[in-house]
Image (spheres, grey):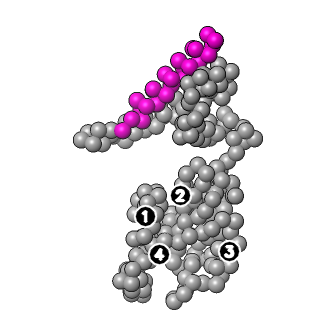
Amino acid sequence: MIVGFFGTVAVVAGVAALWLVLRPRHPGALPPSDEVIFSNRLKVESLFRDLWRFVAVTAAGASAVRRAGLATRPELRRRTRLLAWQAGEVSNANDPRPTITGLIGVYNADGTLRGELAYVVGSRLGTAHCSLCDITHGRVRERPQWRDCRDGLPVPFETFHRNDQPEVTRMLAADKLPVVVATTTAGAVLLLGPDELERCGSSPERLVEAIGTAAERHHLEWS
């Protein structure tokens, strides 16, 4: 009982420390400097690792989690699990990789009639370019080679335009289009940016290969 009490105190103290580091900044406050951002990142990773090491490895930590009710906090569990896995502190047998549930491609062009016309004219004049467009479409319609490669993927691949893309890709891409994003059981992950897509050289097969390589680099599994 004494061990469980002190374990509970330790976990609550760790969560409080995380909140102090991660708490939202006041809207009127000045943005943090690069040094502060880097320092906070190190603090967060260190705190998560220490907290996970206590919770996952010691019996006192497990008892404390149950007593404090923190096991029902999915965000805390997900973030500590990912950081611990990246640090090599949790085995893959007990904590599998995040699983890819879908792929999203965003073109560097608007999906409106005006946007489509502007892209066609701009691509001819050399003022507009979208490497993902070159991979998936020919001059007029979708390329058959791309359809075959897309249908061979283990998960759905959806495409959007700059003006109708989901909010999650808008946040990840930060206006640097085109991109390919993976939706996973642990959240969205940016797989390919403009440079990686350009290196595919308009080839659907090379795009699929690049997606597979990026998934391995981010330690993702296919569903």
Tell which tag, 1 or 3, sits nearer the viewer. 3
Which residue is drawn at the image coordinates 42% and 70% (left, top)? 164
Residues packed near mark 1 inside 10 Å, few (<14), some (14 to 19) or many (20 plus): few
Kind of residue indicated by mark 4: Cys
Kind of residue indicated by mark 1: Lys
* Element at label 1: loop
Q: Are marks 4 and 1 in contact (CB under 8 Å)?
A: no
Residues packed near mark 4 inside 10 Å, few (<14), some (14 to 19) or many (20 plus): many
Image position of 187 with respect to 192: above or below? above
Q: Which mark is residue 176?
A: 1
Which residue is drawn at the image coordinates 51% and 89% (left, top)? 140
Closer to us: 65 or 215: 65
Residue 199: which quarter of the image? Answer: bottom right
90 lies left or right of 134: right
Image position of 59 with respect to 210: above or below? above
The residue to which callout 2 is attached is: 190
What type of secondary structure mainly makes up the magenta span?
helix
The residue to which callout 4 is attached is: 130
* Element at label 2: strand
* Whole-percent x, y for residue 13 in the image: 49, 22
Which residue is drawn at the image coordinates 69% and 41% (left, top)? 95
Q: First in sequence: mark 1 or mark 2?
A: 1
Taking the view exactly as shown, the residue that stands out farthest to the top is 2
Q: First in sequence: mark 4 or mark 2?
A: 4
Residue 151: which quarter of the image? Answer: bottom right
The quadrant in which the C terminus is found is: bottom right
Residues packed near mark 3 inside 10 Å, few (<14), some (14 to 19) or many (20 plus): few
Write the start and end of the magenta stretch as one range.
1-24
